[in-house]
Image (tube, rainbow, N blue to C red):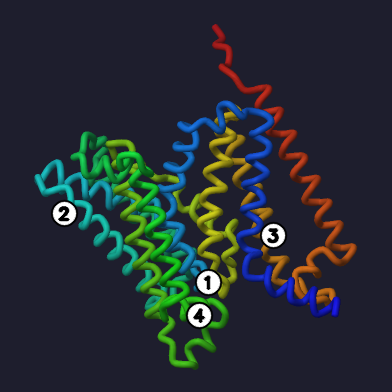
């Protein structure tokens, strides 16, 4: 009877294991900041900053969930966001197109860039990592050529509303856009062939092909969705800053991939966690905001983000092998002495990270100017 009860508990918890990790880290951050900086961190204006920062990455994280689920990766999204925003800016400011036409063109051109990425990967058989990294250079180069070092600024109200507007007595418009894209992504994942086929392709591409699934076509669809969401992020960033330049969005790819992986979507394909990706975006935004609130230098913020990514990937990779000790379900994660040793190692690494951040906080400040 006890075994049956434990098995039922494991089965109930299994679908939520992806979101448990980021949610636990979110509560840890909230608890820590509640002790250290409660007045500054939990004030309404700062919470609004966290939501606005997360909203920028939500559309891309939704699309990247499908790409990674299919065993893919897209390193070009920052350049796609910058180039589509530059094109939109030229259409509006130089050629006097209406703002809504510029927004639609940004989304359409972004999807075309995604189509190009997908065709390079599926038709020319270029690995996702190499193909999208090369196209990142191409798109960034075109952005530099078009902009010629200019900063395009002062856009119509529609653009700024998309980037930083707010409905009266309600949430900011970017947050609503981000939530809407995740609702769309959740529907696509759970209720459409696209979502089911994405999981099947990531689990076993050869078997999916043998069952009649057009693997290449659905890969292209995923990259087109990714390109369109990168274009939307470019519009949102332009509206947020009310300006755009060719070097905009330099770290979009790493931030988005980190959020999706932290949220539990497997880098090895076959497992998608849309709600986990949402929690991952929120977690990274809260963590970076906490480091800024603590006046930690940007370089230490990068260290913390990198450590979180590594620990998350290691945890979920190891979690997939939870039955290696002959046990079943989540209990096996905590069962063996080897696993306990690993948890101790993670604790030591986390403690070292906290010490490094403390040292960085103590040593940060305005450097003295010599001479």
**Residue 193: % across, % down:** 42, 81
Q: Closer to the N terminus: mark 1 or mark 4?
A: 1
Q: Closer to the N terminus: mark 4 or mark 3?
A: 4
The alpha-carbon separation of the residues under discs 4 and 3 comes to 23 Å
Mark 3 residue element: helix
Q: Residues within 10 Å of mark 2 (few under 14, many from 20)?
A: few
Q: Closer to the N terminus: mark 4 or mark 2?
A: 2
Image quarter in which the C terminus is found:
top right
Compared to residue 28, the image places residue 273 above or below, namely: below
Compared to residue 125, the image places residue 259 above or below, namely: above
Q: Which mark is residue 71?
A: 1
Q: Residue furthest right?
A: 337
Q: Closer to the N terminus: mark 1 or mark 3?
A: 1
Mark 2 residue element: helix
For mark 4, what is the residue? 201
For mark 3, what is the residue? 314
For mark 2, what is the residue? 101
Is label 4 or label 2 in front?
A: 2
The alpha-carbon separation of the residues under discs 1 and 4 comes to 8 Å
The alpha-carbon separation of the residues under discs 1 and 3 comes to 17 Å
Q: Is residue 307 left or right of residue 275?
A: right
Mark 1 residue element: loop
Residue 90 or 123: which is nearer the viewer?
90
Q: Quadrant of residue 41?
A: top right
Q: Is residue 104 left or right of residue 307?
A: left
């Amino acid at each position: 009877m006890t075994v049956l009860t434990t098995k039922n508990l494991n089965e109930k918890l299994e679908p939520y294991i992806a979101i448990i990790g980021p949610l636990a880290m979110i509560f840890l951050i909230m608890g820590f900041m509640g002790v250290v900086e409660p007045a500054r961190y939990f004030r309404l204006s700062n919470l609004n900053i966290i939501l606005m920062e997360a909203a920028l990455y939500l559309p891309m994280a939704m699309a990247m969930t499908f790409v990674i689920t299919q065993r893919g990766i897209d390193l070009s999204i920052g350049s796609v966001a910058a180039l589509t925003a530059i094109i939109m800016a030229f259409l509006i400011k130089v050629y006097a197109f209406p703002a809504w036409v510029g927004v639609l063109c940004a989304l359409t051109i972004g999807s075309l860039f995604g189509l190009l990425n997908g065709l390079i990967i599926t038709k020319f058989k270029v690995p996702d990592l190499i193909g999208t990294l090369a196209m990142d250079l191409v798109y960034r180069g075109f952005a530099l050529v078009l902009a010629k070092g200019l900063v395009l600024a002062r856009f119509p109200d529609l653009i700024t509303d998309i980037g930083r507007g707010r409905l009266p007595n309600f949430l900011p418009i970017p947050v609503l856009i981000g939530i809407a894209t995740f609702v769309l992504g959740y529907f696509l994942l759970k209720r459409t062939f696209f979502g089911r086929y994405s999981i099947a392709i990531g689990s076993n591409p050869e078997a999916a092909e043998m069952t009649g699934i057009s693997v290449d076509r659905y890969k292209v669809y995923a990259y087109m969705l990714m390109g369109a969401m990168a274009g939307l992020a470019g519009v949102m960033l332009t509206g947020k800053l009310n300006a755009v330049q060719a070097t905009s969005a330099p770290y979009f790819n790493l931030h988005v991939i980190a959020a999706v992986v932290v949220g539990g979507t497997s880098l090895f394909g076959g497992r998608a966690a849309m709600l986990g990706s949402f929690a991952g975006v929120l977690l990274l935004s809260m963590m970076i905001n906490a480091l800024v609130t603590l006046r930690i230098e940007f370089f230490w913020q990068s260290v913390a983000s990198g450590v979180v990514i590594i620990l998350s990937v290691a945890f979920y990779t190891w979690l997939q092998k939870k039955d290696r000790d002959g046990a079943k379900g989540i209990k096996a994660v905590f069962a063996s002495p080897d696993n306990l040793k690993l948890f101790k190692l993670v604790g030591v690494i986390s403690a070292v990270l906290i010490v490094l951040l403390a040292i960085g906080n103590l040593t940060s400040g305005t450097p003295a100017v010599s001479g």
